[in-house]
Image (tube, rainbow, N blue to C red):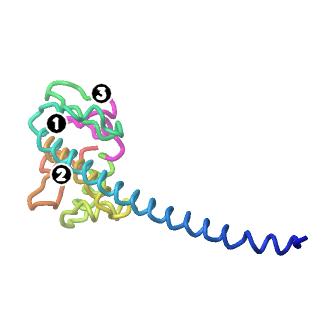
């Protein structure tokens, strides 16, 4: 009759091979998952860029309903309409408060208003991401770029050089439009 230790020693190599095989498969799946996530982020960035270009003239974007985050949804407002709280970026005009915008838009405007008060130059979206404590990865930077472009289209920000944003003349003249 074989000993218990002997039986365990016979089964151990097979268990070790199974564990090693599963680890290799897990590594392969993890790498495939990372590649798929990267591809998904690239498509999301492309959709936002197209949305920004098509949305700047007030047109609705067909694919925007399936957006993963309601914070990314932007509905254009007519100059005479009041913005629904936190859902729109109103066209800048004398008197509107940025408090009707979501926190993300307010943070962008506040950061650029601070730079304006200190007589510092424009900021890029990568610099904004770092300033907000975000990882400066393409997905985060492009999300900020989309929001900054929306603010440019509505007259809150200016983009005098591609990718470099400052307060527009109107909001800057009011001390950052509170």
Q: Which residue is mark 3?
A: 84
At mark 2, the secondary structure is helix
Side of 175 relative to 71 (left or right) = left
Label 1: few (<14), some or many (≥20) within 10 Å?
A: many
Region in magenta: 84-104
Name the residue nearer the viewer: 121 or 74.
74
At mark 1, the secondary structure is loop
Q: Which residue is mark 2?
A: 172
Q: Nearer the viewer, mark 2 or mark 1?
A: 1
- Extreme residue toward the front, this view: 1
Name the residue nearer the viewer: 175 or 129.
129
At mark 3, the secondary structure is loop
Screen quadrant of the N terminus: bottom right
Cα distance, mark 2 to mark 1?
A: 15 Å
Q: Is residue 17 above or below residue 47?
A: below
Q: Earlier in the sequence, mark 2 or mark 1?
A: 1
Label 3: few (<14), some or many (≥20) within 10 Å?
A: few
Q: Which residue is mark 1?
A: 91
Side of 93 relative to 7 (left or right) = left
Prevailing secondary structure class for the magenta stretch in the rendered image: loop
Q: Where is residue 159 drawn, in percent x and y?
A: 12, 56
Q: Where is residue 133 drawn, in percent x and y?
A: 40, 62
Side of 14 relative to 54 (left or right) = right
Residue, x 21% and y 45% (percent of image)? 47
Screen quadrant of the C terminus: top left
Cα distance, mark 2 to mark 3?
A: 24 Å
Q: Which mark is residue 26?
A: none
**What is the quadrant of residue 150 in the picture?**
top left
Q: Earlier in the sequence, mark 3 or mark 1?
A: 3
């Amino acid at each position: 009759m074989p000993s218990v230790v002997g039986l365990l020693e016979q089964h151990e190599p097979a268990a070790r091979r199974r564990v090693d095989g599963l680890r290799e498969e897990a590594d392969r799946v993890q790498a495939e998952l990372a590649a798929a996530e990267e591809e998904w982020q690239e498509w999301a960035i492309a959709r936002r860029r197209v949305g920004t270009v098509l949305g700047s003239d007030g047109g609705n974007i067909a694919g925007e309903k399936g957006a993963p985050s309601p914070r990314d949804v932007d509905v254009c407002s007519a100059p005479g309409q009041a913005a629904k709280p936190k859902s729109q970026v109103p066209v800048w005009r004398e008197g509107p408060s940025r408090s009707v915008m979501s926190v993300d838009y307010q943070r962008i405007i506040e950061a650029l208003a601070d730079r304006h008060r200190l007589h510092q130059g424009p900021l890029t979206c990568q610099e904004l991401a770092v300033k907000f404590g975000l990882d400066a990865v393409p997905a985060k930077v492009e999300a900020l770029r989309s929001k900054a472009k929306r603010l440019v289209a509505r007259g809150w920000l200016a983009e005098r050089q591609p990718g470099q944003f400052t307060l527009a003349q109107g909001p800057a003249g009011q001390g950052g439009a509170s």
